[in-house]
Image: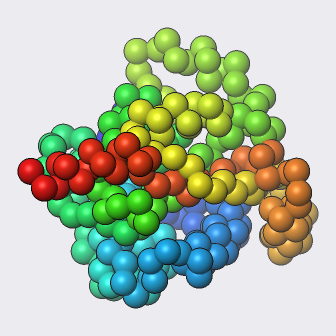
Amino acid sequence: MSYREQFAQASRAAEYERQQWDGTSYPSLIWELERVWLDRYLASSPVPAAQMDYLDFACGTGRVLSYLEERMRSARGIEISAAMLDIARQKVRHAELLCADITATPEIEGRYDLITCFRFLLNAEPALRRQAMRGLAARLKDRDSRLLFDNHGNLSSYKALRWPGSVLRRGQPVYESAGNVLSHSDVMSVLHDAGLEVIARHGYGLLSGKAPQLFGYDRVLELERRLAGAAGLERLGVHQLYVCRLTLKQRTRSALRQRS
């Protein structure tokens, strides 16, 4: 099933919200770690949050957008699923929400100091990954602007056990995101194609998704927090958070397009 179709139905969007973000699930635990990285980025950003125009791409049900929106000068969420946006509207207070496919038109609705993009890259089919990342690069204002996104299926983690199945599925006519993995080199290839460079990378989520059920949510969260800061272990995290900016060459091209 295409990424564009995954959450077209309201029932699937509601099931996703209920299963993923109920406050006791492993994704909820990972979100607690991700909030720390987001806060750290904003504290050291070259552009103060209060001066930022912000976009959350593939904003889903509004988890990241609702967390950051009130700190920003302006905030917008873009999501291809109207059903997901219906749920996001229950959380988001101030941000503008757009139901759109940025790969369907060359028109750009705005340019941003910060773009976040969570749980998209791994789930999208390869061609869509590249199209979307090129579209996001075109929306960055300048080299002080940042794109933050994650790969939540890092091949260098224990998820490597899924690699054989992932390779076998690549030849199937119908794309299936479940069980996928992405290597760092895969990610870098997409970024290079989009004219983006990595300035920071953070890894987290070293334990199995079943760990909270086996050992308790709070205990596993504390252990994951310690492991996330341990030297030499970051690259083994299932989740890899990338902080990117335009390459100098891409920035020059973008500036010329804006003037024309």
Q: Quadrant of residue 213?
A: bottom right
Q: Quadrant of residue 21?
A: bottom right
Q: Is residue 96 visible?
A: yes
> How many labels were placed on the picture?
0
Hey, which residue is sitting farthest left in the picture? 260
Tell me the residue at 59%/55% (across/down): 199
Q: Is residue 115 visible?
A: no
Nearer to me, 164 or 246: 246
Nearer to me, 5 or 73: 73
Tell me the residue at 27%/45% (across/down): 253
Residue 222 picture location, percent across and down: 86, 72
Q: Relative to 158, say whether 143 is above or below.
A: below
Tell me the residue at 84%/56% (across/down): 211
Q: Is residue 17 left or right of residue 151?
A: left
Quadrant housing the N terminus: top left
Q: Is residue 111 left or right of residue 193?
A: left
Colour convention: rainbow
Q: Relative to 212, say whether 176 is above or below.
A: above
Nearer to me, 190 or 22: 190
Residue 130 picture location, percent across and down: 39, 35
Q: Is residue 5 left or right of residue 180?
A: left
Tell me the residue at 37%/78% (across/down): 52
Q: Is residue 201 left or right of residue 63?
A: right
Nearer to me, 201 or 163: 201
Residue 39 picture location, percent across and down: 60, 78
Q: Relative to 193, say whether 41 is above or below.
A: below
Residue 134 picture location, percent across and down: 34, 42
